[in-house]
Image: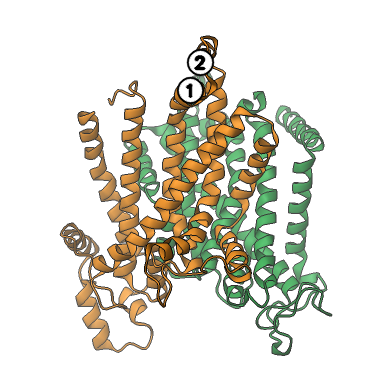
Amino acid sequence: MARFLARRLLHLGPVLLGVSVIVFLVLHLAPGDPAEIMLGANANREDLERLRTQLGLDQPLHVQYVTWIGHVARGDLGRSLWMKRPVLGEVLERFKATLLLTGTALFLSTVGGIALGIASARRANSLLDRLSAVASLFGASMPTFWLGIVLMVIFSLWLGWLPASGMYAPYGGGGLRDLLAHLVLPAITLAAASITIIARLTRAAMLEMLGQDYVRTARAKGLAERPVVWRHALKNALIPIVTVVGVQAGYLLGGAVLTETVFAWPGVGTLVVQGILARDIPLVQGGVLVIALSFVLVNLAVDTLYAWLDPRIKYN
Amino acid sequence: MKVVARDDRRSDQLFRHLSRNRLAAAALLVIALAVLAALAAPWLPLADPDTVETASRLRPPGSPGHPLGTDEFGRDLLSRLVWGARVSLLAGVGTAAAAMVLGVSLGLIAGYYRGWVESLIMRFTDILMAFPFILLAIAIVAGLGPGLRNAMIAIAIVGFPIYARLVRGVVLTVREREFVEAARALGSPDRLILARHVAPHLLSPVVVAFSLDVGAKILTTAGLSFLGLGTQPPTADWGSMLATGRQFVILSPHVVLLPGLAIFVTVLALNLVGDAVRDLLDPRTRAA
């Protein structure tokens, strides 16, 4: 296991390097001068010169990259031009909010999806199973941001049960209760599509496992239905489920951008979008890099989970 | 001649499949109507989608002269939805097609030539897939600058790795088969082998992937427009209509509900047809 982890960590190097090259290059794609794009058409020559020197834009591209990655390795993501603050601090602060939102959504979609999938598999073609199939079709076709707005209109504006936006109430808020109340709608919105995907996959994996000989044996020896389903079938169905949960984690990290925008949730997603509209390249770079890195780590965690779940995956 | 005969059988099969699968047939009808309306928009008796009429702002559906009401600038919503269909459908089909062409070409090259070319292409796709796709699209738009064209380029770039992986996998198995070896032994040039002997094997998996991809691409384009990174005002597009209508959702929910419904119904129809195509072409699901 330790050797497997060490090898996976070694593989991580090239991927991280590639990710950093892409993040760096992508923001230098613009055909024009980034300094001009950032400062707008009305900037004077001295300001442009100063910004070019400050960002190192007067250097060749590969020198710029090496300088940038050197700073990144030391935890320096540059200064936000728009907020006039170091990017790292700002991004990490916002990352907590994104992590809370995606973590909650991942928890909801994993627990909800597996429960729904098992229930559908145990009663295939029942009303619940069909409803779950329709829900998965709807989940794949509905724009997340639209679902968010609809939920907000119903539960915040019409019924007044939950707050419509932000992370805490502007006046008198701040407690855990307040945070949870603000978290409900964004988390459900973000999790909705993933629940249905995980449910469909769990159903398929469970149906396959419940038809296997060892399940028949377990039943034949008089084992109760609960341990048959939960201990025997589910444990073996977990590998494909873990795969799809890993994919969904990445989807949620990305999809959080839209959900955060709908609910004005103060996460990295909204920060990146604001950064783009304010033409703040260091801020956008920092935000994208942090989310991409966390996605790479999620994939590493999923691979490690495989090895733990299935001893046959012999790490070579 | 043989190829034509086989194609006839395929379309016959599709027709029979659709007549049995009423849901997919209805979905196909919805798509046909949306495409027709989008194509015919300039000739339909619709109000100008960009004409501002401040006197009749936020009229509810059913108002005289505005069957679906008006938006915050008094622009006719029905007209904007129909014109928006042009943008949204074009963006969906265009980005999926561009991603497919790019991905299929790179996958073919990687799978057929192997060696360092394959390593280079596949490592590049691995790295692109190390990003959550919408985030990478956002980053590319940030570099290129907001706008529909740039958003479409970004979505096509983000979308090609799936096709590249799929095609490489198929090519890797096909290239070892006897008929390819025979063609190579007979001295056929690579181009001919790829086009005549390898490409036909890609048709089914790529068509299935494409038909399921268009809807996803429409959703992504709408998402970027919603964030203000795609279509720029005053052009109508379902995603941007949703974004601007959001501020008026309490007074006039229809401004947000209608474009969202348009996206939802279209993507749902595309997914249903995509599922039907997959059931027809993918032997594994057909057997199931």
> Could you say which is closer to the camera, residue B230 or residue B169?
B230
Q: Residue at x 42, y 76 (%)?
A: A170
On the image, the x and y values in percent for residue A185 come to: 52, 60
On the image, the x and y values in percent for residue B185 come to: 47, 20
Q: Which color scheme did the rendering employ for the protein?
A: by chain
On the image, the x and y values in percent for residue A119 come to: 58, 33
Q: What residue does disc 2 label?
A: A223
Give the chain ID for the green colour.
Answer: B
**Marks 1 and 2 in Cβ contact (< 8 Å):** yes
Q: Residue at x 38, y 51 (%)?
A: B131
**Dot 2 falls on which chain?**
A
Q: Give the secondary structure at mark 1.
A: helix
Q: Which residue is drawn at 79% across and 36% down?
A: B15
Q: In which quarter of the image is residue B273?
A: top right
Q: In this view, does B2 lie above or below B61?
A: above
> Could you say which is closer to the camera, residue B36 or residue A252?
A252
Instruction: Judge the density around disc 1: few (<14), some (14-19), many (≥20) Cα neighbours within 10 Å.
Output: few
Q: Give residue A227's mark.
A: 1
What colour has chain A? orange
> Could you say which is closer to the camera, residue A283 or residue B112?
A283
Q: Is residue A251 above or below residue A224?
A: below
Answer with left or right where residue B252 lies relative to residue A33: right
Q: In this view, does B198 lie above or below A81?
A: above
Instruction: Judge the density around disc 2: few (<14), some (14-19), many (≥20) Cα neighbours within 10 Å.
Output: few
Q: Residue at x 43, y 30 (%)?
A: A239
Q: What residue type is labelled 1?
A: Pro
Answer with left or right where residue A213 lies relative to residue A86: right
**Dot 1 falls on which chain?**
A
Answer with left or right where residue A178 lies relative to residue A159: left
On the image, the x and y values in percent for residue A2 come to: 20, 30
Q: Give the secondary structure at mark 2.
A: loop
Q: Which amino acid does label 2 sit on?
A: Leu
